Amino acid sequence: MAAAALIRVNRELAKDLGLDADALESVDGLEILAGNRVPDGADPLAMAYAGHQFGGWVPQLGDGRAILLGEVVGRDGIRRDIQLKGAGRTPFSRGGDGRAALGPVLREYIVSEAMHRLGVPTTRALAAVTTGQPVYREAALPGAVLTRVARSHIRVGTFQFFAARRDHEGIRSLADHVIARHYPDAAAAERPYLALLDAVIAAQAALVARWLGLGFIHGVMNTDNTSVAGETIDYGPCAFMDRYHPQTVFSSIDHAGRYAFANQPGIVQWNLAQLAQCLLPLIANDDDLALAAAQSAIDGFPALFEGALTAEMRRKLAVRETRDGDLALAQDLMSKMAENGSDFTLTFRGLADVLDPPAGLPSDGSAGPRRLFKDPAAFDAWADAWQARLAAEPLPAPERAADLRAANPAVIPRNHLVEEAIRAAEDNGDLGPFEELLDALSRPWEETPENVRYRQPPRPDQVVRQTFCGT
Ligand code: AMP
Ligand code: MG
């Protein structure tokens, strides 16, 4: 057996989960994290699921390169799954090797942990190891395993698996399990399975609003990559935008732009409609009644999503009170950003500098986001409207700037930095850039002299235009 080697144990997460980080870093721990040894008392399994991939139905998918080791209850009292991703073949591997390459493992580690620090519901990375065995893709690449932690790995596609087989009892057991595990309040509702659907709809609406507030593009929003627990799951060709454009796509396999940035809410609604379809037999005995109730739940998604997005945008613009026109104000800024090719993260982050210029910068706002716009006057016109809106709820400028800096991150996992960390690891076995990037991303709200390079957009020669699933 080739020698596995530790890349990293997420010690802080291990502690939160009540696990012994030292034990995970030991020789025995490494064997477990590499999938070479089953932990005492564990009974690993691969889960079956189905799903719509790019809108096309696939009746059988499943954990083809993942193995569920078991569950732990963390110090917060929440039960979570621990899963190895890339540990070898399972009954669902089809033609695949069940393995993962180092690059995608590092990418998932970096981006999922960054999302967590940004306050977005997400699966986490507990550890990454190299296996010592090559995996063969377009070239031989170092093999690696990610230890993923999730509230659960139950997807819309898990429900679809049973629905497609008309296994009503299977769907009922699964739904009861999800209610007990994630949405216990639904059990007491008049129609528990409709309440379950409502809860998943609400969780997903809130989740996608967070993505849109950060310029995040998931990239493969297939129904099998949509968690019923409402966490971001399956980091493949995902990416954060640098320059804002609503139709941005990075994934090399998303030719039609189905999962483009601005399409994400509509796609989630479509995925939720697939879940609703699976739950119909449980919602009511009468087919028409069940359909009407499910349809009305799904029809409620756009309003729920808009509410969540409006709240997100209010935070990003630092308005605390609710007024008509707040979302339109944010959308006006974003359409000007799209027209002017301005950087998503820097524009929002820079709003604080308009109100509270950092020491040494001119106080007339000229050093703020306007410089990111091809036509700086476009920003000025918007900023006048924003200032007028802010005047309706006076707040001292430093306090408002603090709100803005707490809502708009300075550091996100920019593609070129993720790429740089992966290249150093894959090409030179150098994990330094990976560790340094993780460190910078652990404090996304801070601007310090040390994190300057992590806040910069890519130079033209560093721009990443395409990302890959890496499976
Ligand atoms: P994904 O695009 O990562 O959501 O994966 C879609 C499906 O392909 C899932 O059922 C995976 O388990 C499966 N899959 C992806 N990569 C591999 C691999 N290397 N070996 C076996 N199955 C895989
Ligand atoms: Mg998947």
Image (cartoon, rainbow, N blue to C red):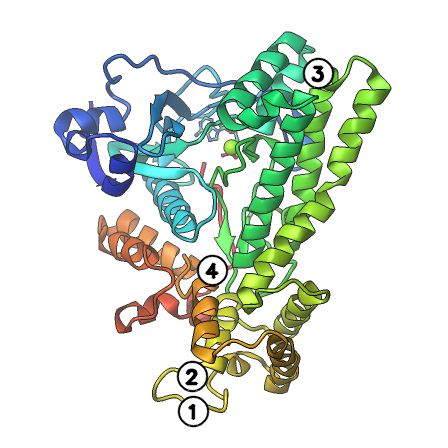
Q: Are marks 1 and 2 in contact (CB under 8 Å)?
A: yes
Nearest-to-viewer mark from 4 and 1: 1
Query: Does label 4 or label 3 sit earlier along the sequence?
Result: 3
Q: Are marks 4 and 3 in contact (CB under 8 Å)?
A: no
Query: Does label 1 or label 2 sit earlier along the sequence?
Result: 2
Query: In the visual, does 218 lie left or right of 91?
Result: right
Q: Position of residue 103 (x, y in %)?
A: 36, 44
Q: Which residue is mark 4?
A: 464
Label disc, if present, on residue 406 of the rendered structure: none
Query: Does label 3 or label 1 sit earlier along the sequence?
Result: 3
Q: CA distance from mark 4 to mark 1?
A: 33 Å
* Residue in view at x 52 percent, y 72 percent: 347
The kind of residue on which mark 1 rests is Pro
* Residue in view at x 39 percent, y 28 percent: 80
The kind of residue on which mark 4 rests is Val
Q: Position of residue 346 (x, y in %)?
A: 48, 71
* Residue in view at x 59 percent, y 73 percent: 341
Camera sees residue 371: yes
Nearest-to-viewer mark from 4 and 3: 3
Query: The N terminus appears in which quarter of the rendering?
Result: top left
For label 2, the crowd category at 10 Å Cα-Cα, with few meaning under 14, some 14 to 19 and many 20 or more, is: many
Q: Which residue is mark 2?
A: 357
Q: Which residue is mark 3?
A: 282
Callout 3 secondary element = helix
Residue 391's place in the image compared with 78, above or below, is below
Residue 356's place in the image compared with 73, above or below, is below
Q: CA distance from mark 1 to mark 2?
A: 7 Å
Query: Does label 4 or label 2 sit earlier along the sequence?
Result: 2
Q: Which residue is mark 1?
A: 362
Query: Does label 4 or label 1 sit earlier along the sequence?
Result: 1
